[in-house]
Image: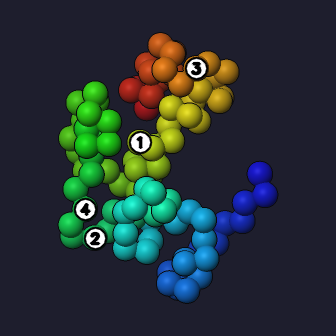
Amino acid sequence: QDAQIVRTRDPQLLAQCDVVVDVGGEYDPGRHRYDHHQRSFTASMRSLRPDKPWSTRLSSAGLVYGHFGPEILAGLLGQPEDGPEVTALYDKV
C-alpha cells in the first residue's frame, strides 16, 4: 500500500530496494530479486512449480506470477490459494 516504485539500474539504489524486478542481473527469490537477463537463467513454470507442464523460459513478469500468482488471485477472488477456482484461473493466465 505504501510502496514506492523506483525505475533505475543503479546498483546502489537497487541494493536498497525490498523487491527488484527485471533489472539487477540476479534471480534470487529469497531476496526478492526477479531478473531473467543473465546467461545462466533457465527457470520455467515447471522448474518453479513441478506440477505445471510449461517449460518455456520465464520473463521477469512470469517469475513474479510464478511465485505470487496464487496468493494474488486468491486475494482477489476471496478463495483459498489451493481452491479449484484459483488453480483454474492461475493455469489459464
Task: Find disc 1 in the rendering and name its residue.
Answer: 66
Quadrant for residue 23, please give it.
bottom left
Type of the residue with mark 4: Phe
Q: Compared to 83, does 60 lie above or below?
A: below
Task: Find disc 3 in the rendering and name its residue.
Answer: 80
Task: Find disc 2 in the rendering and name its residue.
Answer: 38
Q: Nearer the viewer, residue 41 or 29?
A: 29
Q: Nearer the viewer, residue 83 or 7?
A: 83
Q: Is residue 21 visible?
A: no
Local crowd size for mark 4, using a 10 Å CA cut-off: few (<14), some (14–19), many (≥20): some
Q: Is residue 30 visible?
A: yes
Q: CA distance from mark 4 to mark 3?
A: 31 Å
Left or right placement of residue 21 versus residue 3 in this view: left
**Circle nearer the viewer, 2 or 3:** 3
Which disc, if any, is residue 41?
4
Q: Earlier in the sequence, mark 3 or mark 1?
A: 1
Q: CA distance from mark 3 to mark 1?
A: 17 Å
Local crowd size for mark 2, using a 10 Å CA cut-off: few (<14), some (14–19), many (≥20): few
Secondary structure type for disc 4: loop
Left or right placement of residue 8 versus residue 62 in this view: right
Type of the residue with mark 3: Pro
Residue appearing at x 45%, y 57% in the figure: 30
Q: CA distance from mark 1 to mark 2?
A: 18 Å
